[in-house]
Amino acid sequence: MASQCDRCIAVHVKSAIAHGATRDEIVEAGFMAVIMHGGPAYMYMTSLFEALDEFLATENTDSHGTSTNA
């Protein structure tokens, strides 16, 4: 977030999810970056939420595109 790099945010969100981080934990980390870096980092929260939506959706579907949520 502080580096203001969309690709970096996506890579780190994907890795965090793969290592078991929850959506809330990742959002909390994003807001910590905003607290430390200020307004410019806040503008990249949109990128963080987009990455979360994409990678959590991918994690919750199987290889056939079927939702694994029961």
Image (cartoon, rainbow, N blue to C red):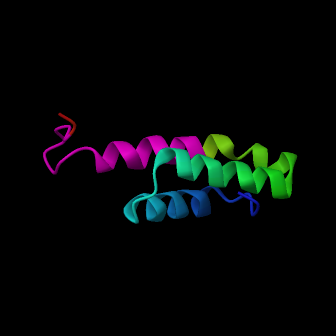
Residue at (76% x, 60% y) in the render: 2
Q: Residue lying furthest right in this view?
A: 38
Residue at (45% x, 40% y) in the render: 53
**Residue 34, percent from left and from top:** 78, 50
Residue 46 sits above or below residue 35 on the image: above
Residue at (32% x, 48% y) in the render: 58
Say which quadrant the N terminus sits in.
bottom right
The answer to whether 40 appears left or right of 49 in the picture is right
The answer to whether 36 appears left or right of 33 in the picture is right
Q: Nearer the viewer, residue 30 or 1?
A: 30
Magenta residues, as a range? 48-68
Say which quadrant the C terminus sits in.
top left
**Residue 59, percent from left and from top:** 31, 50
**Residue 29 found in image quarter:** bottom right
Q: Is residue 52 magenta?
A: yes
Q: Nearer the viewer, residue 18 or 4?
A: 18
Residue 16 sits above or below residue 35 on the image: below
**Residue 7 found in image quarter:** bottom right
Residue 66 sits above or below residue 48 on the image: above
Residue at (38% x, 63% y) in the render: 18
**Residue 21, percent from left and from top:** 46, 57
